[in-house]
Image (tube, grey):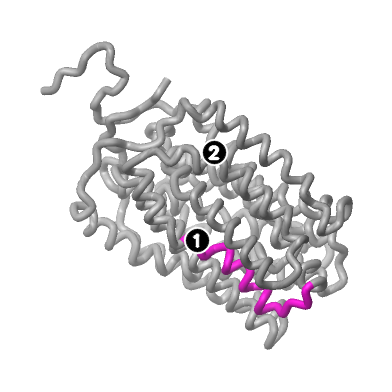
Amino acid sequence: MSVVPASSDLEETRIGPPRFRIDQVLMIISAHFINDTYSAFLAPLLPTLINSLSLTLTQAGSLSAIAQIPSLLNPVIGYLDDMVSLRLFVIFAPAITAITMTCLGFAPDYLTLAILLFVTGLSIAVFHAPSPAMVARVSGDQVGRGVSFYMAAGELGRTVGPLFASWGLLTFTLKGMFPLAIPGIIASIVLFIRFKVIPMHAVRQEGIRKVLPVARRLFIPVIGIIFFRSFLITGLGVYLPTLLAGEGASILAAGSTLALYQLGGVFGALLGGSISDRLGRKPVLFAVSVLAPVSVFFFLQSSGLRILLSLIFAGFFSLSSQPIMLAIIQDHLPNHRSVANGFFMAISFLCLSLSAVIIGMLGDRIGLRQALMWTVAAGFVVAPLVLTLPGQPANAYPVTNSISEN
């Protein structure tokens, strides 16, 4: 038995279960909302960038892939976050993402555009590797709920982002959008002042070798799920405005339709993790994995008002699986949450990058709508892979030396 001085703010304890810290959760998810609002600018700006720089669909798809390349560093970022505090990276990410994404119109050629998006990708990576683990640490025994809030905030940002970008494009033109970066800069200033109360990392760790068997059993099916699911998400998330603009829709209409898809994702992300807390991760993940490709198929076959309804369902089911997957990762590796999340994010972003390029190449060859039909086929592979995931662990709470810095 160890004795800790009463005056110490660090108390070694096993959490089981701590309470849900709503104030700290809200602070983190607000930062996620701001950051992801700007990260969603590319899709609505893509038709204009294609026209102004004479890009092919393959080049357009590669831009999304370039923005995802820094995500390969997520395991390293996560490992560092488990060892030391990466607070400043999380704080300044919204400002950096805002500045780079509002400067895309200044790019005179494809190479410059690629560089700007690579910097954006770095900013996104250093935010997304530590922040989900931060949410998990302040969510107590309701990790699914906390992760759902986190993902819903991101989806809400990606809902607002296309509308914000479309409005900025029509109001300021592509080269005059920099004023839109002001909210992101202000957000980083506020975060710098307020983030001091958030616990950033657990001090006490298990050895990496000790958790490798668990990680292998978990990540082998997870990689397959992420890969096939990425086609379904990238198809509409990246190419929906381009598809609609190519079929005669206005910039505002195309951006609004993407926002509607993301709005469905907000509710899916908000409910997915919370429901999985009650009904179990695998059953809920299996259900949404079956319904997601079905809803995308109905969207591609619909017309009139049915397009809008099917698009909401497509967003709801396609994007509700992300918080469930994230909660599964956090449950199985509670003492290595940041590094586990880093691997998860790296795999996710890599698969999203590959799928964006593949869909773009298919679109150049057979047409974009037909290429999106192939994403539906890929989506149907996910549900059987969900059944191979390991069961829920008995104890998902970490041993930690730091709970709060209040």
What residue is disc 1 on?
70
Q: Is residue 223 left or right of residue 304?
A: left
For the C terminus, the quadrant is top left
Along the viewing direction, whichever of 15 and 387 lies nearer the viewer? 15
Q: Give coordinates of residue 341: x percent, y percent.
A: 40, 51
Is residue 267 visible in the rendered image? The answer is no
**Mark 2 secondary-structure assignment:** helix
Q: Which mark is residue 112?
A: none
- Marks 2 and 1, Cα distance to the nearest angstrom? 18 Å
**In the depicted structure, whether residue 288 falls above or below residue 82:** below
Q: Does residue 216 show up?
A: yes
In x, y percent, where is residue 222? 39, 63
The amino acid type found where label 1 is placed reads Pro
Upstream in sequence: badge 2 or badge 1: 1
Q: Position of residue 59 (x, y in %)?
A: 66, 76
Residue displayed at 73% across by 53% down: 102
- Residue at image x 51%, y 55%? 321
Front residue of 318/157: it is 157
Q: Quadrant of the N terminus?
A: top left
Compare residues 335 and 60 and report the one nearer the observer. 60
Residue behind mark 2: 91
The residue stretch that appears in magenta: 53-71
Considering the numbered disc 1 on the image, is that residue within a helix, a strand or a loop? helix
Magenta: main secondary structure equals: helix
Q: Residue furthest top?
A: 6
* Residue at the left extreme of this rendering: 1
Q: Is residue 147 magenta?
A: no
Left or right, 220 with reference to 269: left
Q: Horizontal and vertical percent for residue 103?
A: 73, 55
